[in-house]
Image (cartoon, rainbow, N blue to C red):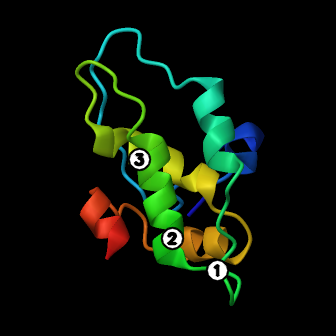
Amino acid sequence: MADNRTIAQLLEAPTEGYEDAIVVPEITADNFKLKHGLLNLVQNKQFFRHDKEDPHAHIRYFNKITSTMKFPNVPSTSIKLMLLLFSLEGAARIWLEKEPPRSIQTWDDLVS
């Protein structure tokens, strides 16, 4: 059977099966935008998953930082799920990238 795709179609990277593990619920609030300063706060204290790092301490700090921002009609869990990737680096980020696609749909899923 002949493959009738164009060269451009053949060169496109497949996207099937490459979805992120974290599913951020749709945000319907008008003019919602994360502030650059919030991203900086989260990135200033990244979790690498080194032996001497405490993941529970990281989550407590992360919760403190993300709870300082309130947006009308935006659940705080959506903000947390959106920002978590920015707080991870090294082995911790690799761990998250190895989680099955769309397997983390709530903050409780992530914490467990």
In contact (CB < 8 Å): disc 2 and disc 1:
yes
Counting from the top left corner in percent of width and height, residue 82 is at 46, 43
Residue 109 appears in the rendering: yes
Residue wearing tag 2:
57
Up-down: is 18 above or below 65? Answer: below
**Residue type for callout 1:** Glu
Say which residue appears at 70% left-offset and 64% top-offset: 89
Please name the residue that numbered disc 1 is placed on.
53
Residue 10 place in picture, x, y as percent: 71, 49
Q: Secondary structure at mark 3?
A: helix
Q: Earlier in the sequence, mark 3 or mark 2?
A: 2
Kindly identify the residue that appears in the image at 27 percent across and 21 percent down.
28
Q: Nearer the viewer, mark 1 or mark 3?
A: 1
Report the number of numbered marks.
3
The image quadrant of residue 111 is: bottom left
Q: Nearer the viewer, residue 24 or 43?
A: 43
Q: What is the three-letter code of the residue carrying label 3? A: Lys
Identify which residue, 46 or 7, lies in the foreground.
46
Mark 3 or 2, closer to the camera: 2
- Quick check: can you spot residue 19? no
Q: Mark 3 sits on what residue?
A: 80
